[in-house]
Image: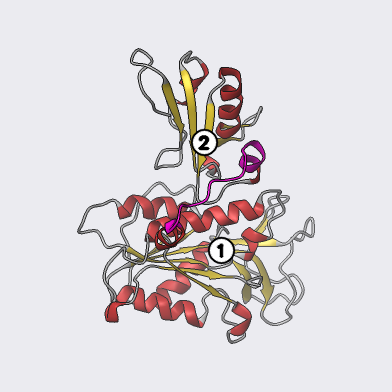
Amino acid sequence: MNGTDDRLGPVIAVITSLAQGDLHPDFPEIENDPDLQAIVVVDDADEALEDERAPTWHARDVGFERASRAGASVRVVTPVPTVDALHHLPVPARPPAGGATAGRAGWPRVEVVDPRDDQPGRGVLGTRLAEVLHATLDRGARAVCVLNRTGRARLLACVHCSELARCESCGATVAEVDGGLSCGRCGTTRPLVCLHCHGTKLRAVRSGVRRIGEELAALLPRASVAVVEGSSAEHPDVDVLVGTEAALHRAASLATGGPTSPPVGLVAFLEFDQELLAPRVHAAEAALWLLVRGARLLGGPGAGAPAPGGAAPGLLLVQTRVAA
């Protein structure tokens, strides 16, 4: 939140999050300012504006309520307005003549890939992804691969009998952790052994970011690869960053490292269906906001390092089975 000093005249409050995803510390001041004239909410889809602690609240809703009590106006500035914002506001303002073209110029190239068109058994590391990864690294740019699935593997099956790996105590599926298998329901652990046939070779049905990181390192032997999860504190300066959406935060901090820092040339969402089809009310909005965050790392077609042949360097790759 920022604005003019109340001693100098009317105050305009701007509600936005900080670069690291936290709400601006001056936000509470809008509750006590008697000269508030207008509130501007920037990127109301940003989850950083929402506090999930009880009682839950969203900075956008607080802004609307404060404005209604003070008789102030409210503006929401965002590339992807949420349903809640549209409910409170009149018809959204459209870009002026020629503004739509300028708005599209701010987006990178977007490519949607259907994994069903690839060869069976490729998993999330498909043929097209491998091609653009090599092309991105060849021109000296970074790549960011996003998969919101922590750990090594969240679902496994036996290579010999195809039975799912399940917990011997409660029957729930188990996940692969360092050194064995662990049940997320009851906490039981065991070695990498199938209960049905006692085989010791298990394949990942739903790989986590750590396993994907290992597979990317094998696919790109000359590149440095690092895995980032929400609990990761370091900011690895590498060629390929793979992880949960926390990787977008880390990549943003690396992108501001100076003119000598390699630009981000590729942001790939490895399994976007789990975002689109997540069992929550605002799943589609949250998924679209992830695309916005990825697009901002890349910038428009003119951003980043020049590509061979004059091609636009920034590519936002989305792997999904519900592309239609």
Amino acid at the residue labelled 2 = Arg
- Counting from the top left corner in percent of width and height, residue 137 is at 32, 73
Could you say which quadrant of the image residue 148 lies in? bottom right
Could you say which quadrant of the image residue 133 lies in? bottom left
Quadrant occupied by the N terminus: top left
Q: CA distance from mark 1 to mark 2?
A: 40 Å
Quadrant occupied by the C terminus: bottom right
Nearest to the eye among marks 1 and 2: give it: 2
Give whichever of 209, 51 is nearer the camera.
51
Asked whether 183 falls inside the magenta stretch, the response is: no
Residue 163 shown left or right of residue 237 in the figure: right
Q: Main secondary structure of the magenta part?
A: loop
Badge 2, how many Cα within 10 Å: few under 14, some, many 20+? some
Q: What are the residue bounds of the magenta stretch?
A: 84-99
Badge 1, how many Cα within 10 Å: few under 14, some, many 20+? many
Residues marked 1 and 2 touching at CB (< 8 Å): no
- Counting from the top left corner in percent of width and height, residue 211 is at 51, 67
**Residue 228 in view of the camera:** no
Q: Which residue is mark 1?
A: 208
Seen as rendered, the residue at the extreme right is 170
Give whichever of 80, 9 is nearer the camera.
9
Seen as rendered, the residue at the extreme left is 260
Give whichever of 21, 65 is nearer the camera.
65
Say whether disc 1 or disc 2 marks the residue closer to the N-terminus.
Answer: 2
Could you say which quadrant of the image residue 9 lies in? top left
- Residue located at (33% from left, 77% from top): 311
Seen as rendered, the residue at the extreme bottom is 119
Q: Which residue is mark 2?
A: 75
Q: Is residue 87 above or below residue 285?
A: above
**Dot 1: element:** loop
- Counting from the top left corner in percent of width and height, residue 84 is at 65, 41
